[in-house]
Amino acid sequence: MGMAFSAKSYCRQKYLLGIAGMFYSVALLLVFLGSGLSLCLEKIIGHSGIASVLSSAVFLLVILFFYYLLSLPLNFYSGYTLEHEYGLSRQRVSGWWMEQLKSEALAYVISLFLVLSFYWIISSFPQWWLVVSLAWVVFNVVLAKLAPVLILPLFFKYKKLEDEPLRRRILDLAARMRVRLLDVFEIDFSKKTLKANAGLTGIGSSRRVILADTLKDKYTHDEIEAIVAHEFAHFQRGHIPKLIAVNALLVMGLFYIIFRTNAYFLAVFRLDSLAQPAGLPLILLYFAIFGIILQPLEAYVSRVFEREADSLALKSIGKKEAFISMMEKLAQQNLADRDPHPLVKFFFFDHPPIDERIKSASRN
């Protein structure tokens, strides 16, 4: 009862913080645009004599810096205080700050590349919304390939899995499920959180299985095999390209809406063009609002794929008891909301709730 209450309390706070974060972001962008601060900042940077490309870089740096400062109390409570309060992390505050520094630096570099590319495209192509959409898809595919090689090592140390019997079992499972792997790796997840996780990441020659070190002491090989089989099932069912296709359609729709409606909102906020630095918060506002609107749809599609992956994983390994016991352990270790309110599930859950997944496995 105590653990169930703790999980409910933890998840309730995460939901509230998630809702607060979404609407807080929208409010900050509206204030920044509506008050004229965006235009004022552009003029200050423009009068400093900085070259046009550098002025965009400086503008982006300033707004990201102030957004981070204004969001810091919420982020610190959600990412550090709450996790320690419920015993889900032993990370030191210095480690949290170091991760924040690396995350924000990486976010700035990626954002700057995207922003400058966007400015170039809208100034070069009349139907820029279509070109931007295609470029967005290409960028995400490239990022998925490079992430395990260039980005993941910035935050975690990982090495080839030393448990040879488990490594061999996973490689054999990959062969049976026709998944080509580079290898199986273990990451030091415990330096950040005591939650458990595993994943199949990368594309083509960079594809690899990554196991959190928080799995090894609490889960049997059968249970870990069940986790990995679920990830392989996503690959076998083509869920990753399907998700990319769904995302591409949604992004294309969003950029088309921006293309058709931006003139009106530029006038409302006294802006001349999306290509000017002061127009950047307007683009971010579009993304923030449409992110809120589309989240239930994206969560629904993801839940459908997760159910398919569960079903195929069970058929592939034939170990119902291991799958169910793995789910029970994950629910306890991660303080999962096992049976959320339907509205909570509709908006927040990109996986079926744990109790639903266990019931489905029991019927197979």
Image: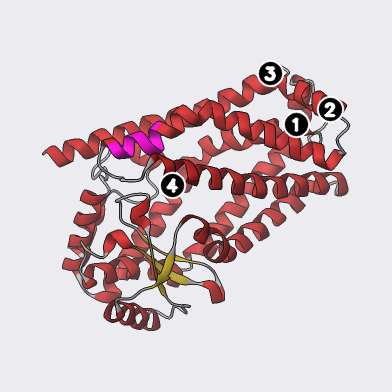
Q: CA separation, marks 3 and 1?
A: 12 Å
Which is more N-terminal, label 2 or label 3? 3
In the structure shown, which secondary structural element does the residue marked by tag 4 occupy? helix
Is 83 one of the magenta-colored residues? Answer: yes
Q: Name the residue under label 4.
A: 299
Q: Residue at the location (43% across, 33% down)?
A: 76
Q: Is residue 133 part of the magenta span, yes or no? A: no
Tell whether 143 sits left or right of 61: left
Q: Residue furthest top?
A: 35
Whether residues under marks 2 and 1 lie with C-beta atoms below 8 angstroms apart, the answer is yes
Comparing 76 with 28, the one in front is 76
Alpha carbons under labels 4 and 3: distance apart: 32 Å
Which class describes the residues within 10 Å of circle 1: few (<14), some (14-19), or many (20+)?
many
- Residue tagged by mark 2? 272
Prevailing SS of the magenta stretch = helix
Q: Give the range drawn in magenta.
A: 77-84
Q: Residue at x 39, y 83 (%)?
A: 175
What amino acid type should be assigned to the residue bearing mark 4? Ala
Tell me the SS state at disc 3.
Answer: helix
**Picture coordinates of residue 220 (x, y %)?**
20, 69
Question: Between disc 2 and disc 1, whose residue precedes?
Answer: 2
What numbered label is drawn on residue 279? 1
Q: Please state which of the two labelled residues, at mark 4 or mark 1, is closer to the viewer.
A: 1
Of badges 4 and 3, nearer the viewer stands 3
